Every structure is written in structure tokens, then in C-alpha cells.
Image (cartoon, rainbow, N blue to C red):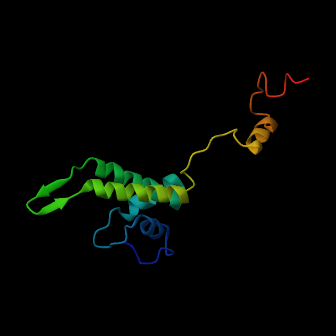
Amino acid sequence: MSYSGDPGNSDTDFVRFQIGDTDTDHEIYTDAEIQYAIDYFETNERAAYELVNQLIAAFSRKADKTTGGISVNYGRSMADWRRLKAQLGLRAGMAGMYAGGVSTADIEANEANTDVPERDFKRGDFEY
């Protein structure tokens, strides 16, 4: 089965829509491959992210080619796929950097968490 034209129709159509795999004549992934990714990664957004990651890996093995007046530039395609991967990562809650213990709320949460080992000393220990 291929893309139905309605991303709300099924999980596989949603993932196809997210990664741009909507050309029914030239599908990038089979429905079985997409369904496997959905089952394995547990969310449609994460499955889309990981499938794009696989495409980047596949394109990274290809070299740019020019024959006569025709050029195939895989480097440009990879840059486009990387941009899409970053966008999908944001949607899947996977992108961005986190530095723990920087905000006051993080510090207070860590101090209240009994599973975090107690520090030998902390700010304010030597104030009289």
C-alpha cells in the first residue's frame, strides 16, 4: 500500500507526510519498513526522525557525480535531509541541549530528590 493523500488516514501515512515520502510512484520506504519504525520507536514523530536519520546514512555513502551536462549532487540532498531531521527532532522532543542544575528550580529539585547522592559540601555551608 502507498500514501493515501491523507496523513490522518493511518500512522504510516502520517510518517510518510512528515518525511516527504508522498510520491506513490517513487516511495522511499515500504509500509512495512515504516510500520516497523513506528513499532520499534513507539511514536510516529520518533519513527519519522529515525527514518530520516537512515536516509542521511544512505546518502552519506554516495558521491556527487557529473556526467556530460547532468549532475547529481548528494551533498545538497544531505543538507536538506539534515534540516528536516532537526525539525523532526524538535517535534519528537529530541533536539536541543540541556544543562542540568543551572536553574534555581533544577537545583531545588535535585536537592529534594532523595535518589540524588548528597554532596559533601554546598554553597552556604561555611557562612556564619
113 sits left or right of 38 in the view: right
**Which quarter of the picture shows residue 108?**
top right
Quarter of the figure with residue 5: bottom left
* 98 over 123 or under it: above or below: below
Q: Residue furthest left?
A: 68
- Seen in the picture, residue 126 relative to 28 is either above or below; the reply is above
Q: Can residue 49 be seen in this view?
A: yes
Residue drawn 69% across the image and 40% down it: 102
Tell me what residue is drawn at x 20 percent, y 59 percent: 72
- Return the residue nearer the eye: 61 or 97: 97
User: Is 12 rendered above or below residue 50?
Assistant: below
User: The C terminus is located in which quarter?
Assistant: top right
**Quarter-wise, where is residue 101 in the image?**
top right
- Residue 47 visible at all: no
Q: Residue at x 40, y 52 (%)?
A: 53
- The location of residue 88, given as percent across then percent down, is 49, 59
Q: Residue at 44% x, 56% y: name it.
A: 85
User: How many labels, in total?
Assistant: 0
Residue 115, position as x, y percentages in the image: 76, 33
Question: How far from the left and from the top, in percent, is residue 9?
Answer: 49, 75
Query: Viewed as shown, does residue 44 lie left or right of 71?
Result: right
Q: Which image quarter is the N terminus in?
A: bottom left
Q: Residue furthest right?
A: 128
Q: Give 126 or 80, whichever is nearer the viewer.
A: 126
Q: As drawn, is 102 to the left or to the right of 41?
A: right
